[in-house]
Image (cartoon, rainbow, N blue to C red):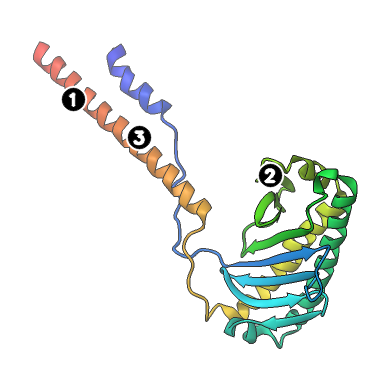
Amino acid sequence: NNLLKFPALLLAGLPTLDFLLASGAGTHSLCYDFTVNCKPAPGQQWCTVQGQVDQKNFLSYDCGLDKVKSLSALGEKVSATITWEEQKTALREMGDMLKHKLADIKAENDMARGLHILEGRMCRQHKSNSSWQFGFNGQMWLHFDSDNRRWREMHSGSNWMKEMWENDKEVTEFLCRSSMGDCRTWLQKFLVQWEPELEPTGPSSAIIDRVSQESAASTLILSALLWILTYIIHLCLQIFLTG
């Protein structure tokens, strides 16, 4: 009797799964790369911005001249909209804020003495997450998840900057407002014009990871069920042969 109960107990202990029906359509993204130079050489801009949709450049912006330029057909498609002008104003304000915070970093920490050019990347995925990344000399140092307001180090020497900015309420509010507010609004409004021109994107990385995990779990459960079936058949044969 105990042997007969074993398969049922094993089945009861198996985890249940909510299988994900992943669609083929992914999410479009809108990103802005900021380069802020606190000591520009003659002829250099103190702040420039490159805008990208699905990793393709569509605009450039010079904060000093307050001039935005379309770089592609996608940029031309939205360059006459009110959102385009609102975007220009907001990008200038973001550049000013980053310049101010770069000056604070250099004034308050000796480790930043030789860091003159701050690089920032703001991104928003449609109906998904928002984030910022920051670094120097082509190396990203910090990642900020706007949705949960958490910082993550991306460089071994960035702890001092992480501690400084995660305790700066003004920085936190600015990063959340710009990425979850401005950037999200621009993407929503631009997509009305862009979607017919944009190529479909693949499933998001989160979907791919979850499908992979559930596929592995399904394989494990199937193997367990086959083992149980073999066990039951063997047990039944034993009972039949012994009468």
- Image quarter (top left, top right, bottom left or bottom right) of the C terminus: top left
Disc 1 is placed on an element classified as helix
Residue under circle 2? 152
The quadrant the N terminus occupies is top left
Residue 74 drawn at (x, y percent): 59, 82
The secondary element bearing badge 2 is classed as: strand
Can I make out residue 243 in this image? no
Looking at the image, is 220 positioned above or below residue 104? Answer: above
Compared to residue 163, the image places residue 194 above or below, namely below
Q: Residue at x 58, y 79 (%)?
A: 194
Q: Residue at x 63, y 81 (%)?
A: 71
- Judged left or right of residue 91, residue 188 is left
Of mark 2 and mark 3, the one earlier in the sequence is 2
Q: CA distance from mark 2 to mark 3?
A: 34 Å
Task: Specify few, some or many for label 3: CA neighbours under 10 Å numbering under 14, 14-19, or 20 or more.
Answer: few
As drawn, 162 above or below 87: above
C-alpha span from label 3 to label 1: 20 Å
Residue position for label 1? 233
**Residue of label 3:** 220
- Residue type, label 3: Leu
Mark 1 and mark 2: span between their CA atoms?
Answer: 53 Å
